[in-house]
Image: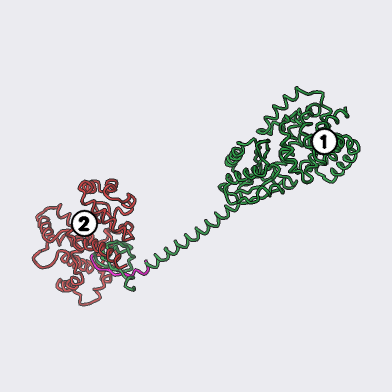
Chain colours: A red, B green
Amino acid sequence: MKDSHQLNESLKLANQGNEIERELLIQHYKPYVINVVSKICKRFVTWSDDETSIGLIALNKAIDTYKPNQGRTFLNYVYLIIKRDLVDYFKNEHKEKHLSFNHNPESESTLAEIETSMERHESQQKNEDIIEEILALNQQLVKFGIVFEELEQYTPTHKKTKKILLEIATALIKNQTCLESLYQKRRLPISELTKLVPYSSKTIERHRKYLITLVVIKLHPNWIHLSQLIDHEGKEGATYETSK
Amino acid sequence: MKHLNKEKGIVIKLTDESIVLMLDDGNFKNIPRSGEYPSIGEQYEFTKKKGFSYMNITKYASLASILIVSILVYVLSSGETNEPSYLMVMDINPSIEIEVGEQDKVLGMKGLNEDGRDVLRGLEHDQHITSLVKAIHHKLAELDYINDDEVATISTSIVSIENNIEHHQDVIQQIEAEFEQDQTEVFTNQVDYEVYENAEKLNLTVNQMDFYNQLKKQDKVKHVDEVRGLSIKELNELRDEKKGLQSEQNKPNGQIQNGKSNQTQSGSKKEQNASEQHNERQDTRQQPDQEVGNTKQENKEQPGSKDDKSKATPEQNGDVEETPKDSKETSETTEETTSQENEKRKPDSESQESNDLEDKNTNQPNRDQEVEQEREDQELSEEKDEKSTDGEQEEDSQSRASSRN
C-alpha cells in the first residue's frame, strides 16, 4: 500500500515522465478501476470492454491532474474522473438507457453535481484506506500467482487450523532464509517450514495460498485494516473458545 | 442466534460470478453475485443461511453415509464369518466334523458317531482351529484313542468350500505337526465339497470314502457296507494288507480300536473283509518272503501318496491273490476276536466267485444284500465248524489254511 506520502512521490515521479512509476500506479489501481466501472455501469465488465478502457484512460488522466492539497484522496479523485468520463461516453454513444442516473432529467452531469454525489459516496465509504490495502495486497499476491477468488478454497474451516497457520506464518517471517526463499522462488519453502514448526507438510500444502496471504499481510503491519482482520481472527478464536 | 446467520465481510474483488469477500474473521469467501456491484472495500453483509443449511445437509449426509457403510460392513462381515470356508473331517474311529470359517475360526463341530460326540463333549467351539485341534488331540489321548503303546491312525480331510488351496495346505501342515509328536500315523487329504456330498449320500465320512474308493479299486471291498463303521486303522490295515504283507506290529492297536468301534454293524463288516483275506492267504502261502519285501516298501510310500497305490493296484491285486496272506492273516486274526467273526467270514469265500456280479451291482444295495445273505448261508455251513473250535486267532487262521489246503 502506498500511504499518502509515498503516493504523492509516485505521482510526482510519474508526472515528471517516469513511465515505470506511472505503469506501477496503473497496475496498482487497475482492480479498482474495473470495480468502479462495473459499479457505475451496473454490469460486470472485463478488460476488453470499452468502458474499462475509458476507466483506464480516466485513471491515467487522474494521475496527471491529481492535486494532493485539495483535500480529496486520490482514490476519490479517480472515482470522480472515471464517473465523469463514463457519463460523457454514454452521452456521446447514446447509451443513456444503460445508466440509471440518467433517468433524472436534471442530471446534466456537471462536475459540481458529481462532486455532491461523491460526498455521499465518500460518506458511505469511510474506509478508503481499506481499498488501498486491498489493492496493495492484490499487487503482492499477483507476484505469487494468487488471485483473490481462489483463496476461498485454501481457507481453513476450523479455528484451530487458522491458529496453526498463523503460527506457521509468524515462524516463517522470523526465519530470514525461509522468507528470502519464499520471495525468490515465489513458493513456500515447505520442507524448511516443517523443520521450523511441529506441523505436517500436508497442512501447509493444503492451505499454502492462504498461508502466503497471511505472510504478506503480516509483513505489512501498516495495512491496519487487514492486519486487524487477521488478528481479529486470533482474538475471535480465543473468545470463542473461552465463551464455550 | 439469528445474528449468527449473517456474516459481514469486505468486498475485495468482483468476478463474473461472485463477490470475493474477506470476512471479519480473516477468512476468504466467494459468494454468488446477484445483480449487485458493490465496490471494493465496501462492507458487505450476507446471510449465511444458505451455506449453513448446505453444510448441515452435507454433515447429515456424511453421517448417514457413514452409518449405512458401517451397517453394510457389519452385515457383510458378519455374513462372511458365518459362512464356513472349509470343513475339517477327522476320523480315527471317532469321527468328527469341524466347520471352519474365515481366519480359521471354528464355527461349529459335530461328532459323526457316538465316539466322536464323546470326544467333542466339553470342548469349546469358539476358538481357532489350531487350538481346537490341540484340544481334540488332548481329549483323544485322554480317552485312550491315542497312547504311547500303540500307533494310532488318523485320517483328516479338508473339504474346501472356498477355494483357498494354499491356506488349506497350511492347516494340513499344522494338523500333521500337532500329531507328529506321538506315534501316530496321520493321513491328510484335501477334497472338494462335491466329494463330501457324495460321501454323505453313502453315509460315510470323507475319509472312509477315500479308503473305500481305494479298497474298491483293489477289489478288496465290494460294497459300501463293508467299510461303514470301520476305524481308520482297520481300513488302513485292510488296504495295506491286500497289497502285500504288512508288519504285524500294528495289530495290537488295531485290537483296541476295534474293541471300541465294533459296537454296531461296523464290526460285522470288518470281519467280512477279514474272512476274504483269509481265503486269499490260504491260496497264496506258497510265495512268501520275496513279496514281503516289496509290499513293505509300498506300504511306506502309501501314507504320503495314495495315487501310487491306485496305480499299483493291478500288480498288487495279482500279488494279493497269490502271496500276501501271511501279513493279512496276522492282522485279521486279531480282529477276529469278537464273536461276530464267524458269521462274517463265511460270506467272504463266496465273494471271490461273485466279484463280477458285485461290481456291477454295487449301486443296487438290495441285490447286494441278497447276494451276501446267500453267501453267508453257504459259508456258514462250511466254515462254522472250523472257527468256533479255535481258541486263539492265529491258530484259527493256520488251521483254516491247512484245512483248505
Q: Residue at x 67, y 30 (%)?
A: B301
Residue picked out by circle 1: B275
Q: Is residue A4 toward the left or the right of residue B109 in the image?
A: left
Question: What chain letter is assigned to the residue under label 2?
Answer: A
Residue A135, magenta (yes or no): no
The answer, for residue A187, to whether it is visible in the render is: no
Instruction: From the top left corner, tell me how far across and down residue A241 is, in percent.
Output: 30, 65
Q: Amino acid at mark 2?
A: Lys
Seen from the viewer's position, the closer of residues A134 and A29 is: A134
Q: In the figure, B297 relative to B203: above or below?
A: above
| Corner quadrant of residue B231 | top right
| In the foreground, A186 or A243 | A243
| SS class, disc 2 | helix
Residue depth check, mark 1 versus mark 2: number of the one nearer the observer: 1
Quadrant, the N terminus of chain B:
bottom left
Q: Quadrant of residue B145?
A: top right
Location of residue A148 (image quadrant): bottom left
Residue sitting nearer the eye, A193 or B181 = B181
Where in the figure is residue B128, as x and y percent of width and height?
A: 57, 47
**Viewer-nearest residue: B365 or B244:** B244
Residue at image position (47%, 63%) is B64
Q: Chain of mark 1?
A: B
| Residue B48 magenta | yes
Q: What residue is rendered at 18% in x and 72% in y?
A: A123
Give residue A225's mark: none
Amino acid bearing label 1: Ser
The reply, left or right, for residue B215 in relation to residue B127 is right
Q: On the rendered structure, is B310 left or right of B74? A: right
Numbered disc 1: secondary structure: helix
Q: Residues within 10 Å of mark 1 (few under 14, many from 20)?
A: many
Q: Which residues are magenta?
A: B41-51
State the residue position of label 2.
Answer: A218
